[in-house]
Amino acid sequence: MKIKQLLFAFAMLSLAIGFNSCKKNNETISEEFENTFEASGNQAVSDNLTEDANDMFLQVADENNIAGGFTAGGPVIVNDFIPCATVTITPLSGFS
């Protein structure tokens, strides 16, 4: 009879521990979602700024006829292309 009581007590203790160990922490999940949304927003802003800068650079390169599509005998150095910048173009490596 004593073994049955110990077995029943052990089963109840295991059941109680099992139910208590499966509780979810909702604070961690909401923090993860918040961090994911913030990182996604930051990545979108970064992508837009990079795309705008790239578009502006290619537009200026096209307006000054140095966007590519030609072969030069040597490196081409264009001064005052963009204020405070020097662009060197070589046939093998492109912009540098």
Image (tube, rainbow, N blue to C red):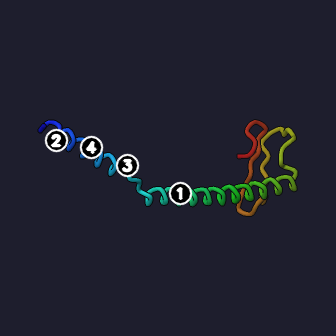
Pointer 2: residues within 10 angstroms few (<14), some, or many (20+)?
few
Number of the front mark, 1 or 4: 4
Q: Is residue 96 left or right of residue 43?
A: right
Quadrant position of the N terminus in the picture: top left
Disc 3/disc 4 C-alpha distance (Å): 13 Å
Q: Earlier in the sequence, mark 2 or mark 3?
A: 2
What residue type is disc 2 on? Gln
Horizontal side, residue 32 vs residue 52: left or right: left
Which of the two residues, 94 or 86, is positioned nearer the viewer here? 94
> Is label 2 in a helix, a strand or a loop?
helix
- Name the kind of residue labelled 3 in the image: Cys
| Residue identifier under label 4 | 14
Q: Which residue is mark 3?
A: 22
- Could you tell me residue 92's position as x and y percent? 75, 36
User: Would you name the residue on which mark 1 appears?
Assistant: 33
The CA distance from mark 2 to mark 1 is 47 Å
- Of 6 and 35, nearer the camera is 6
Q: Is residue 62 left or right of residue 46?
A: right
Residue extending farthest bottom: 83
- What kind of residue is marked 1? Phe
Q: Position of residue 22 (x, y in %)?
A: 37, 49
Discs 2/3, front = 2
Per the image, label 3 sits on a secondary structure element best described as loop
Q: Amino acid at mark 4?
A: Ser
Most extreme residue toward the front, as rendered? 1
Mark 1 and mark 4 lie on one chain; the one further toward the N terminus is 4
State the CA–CA distance, disc 1 to disc 4.
33 Å
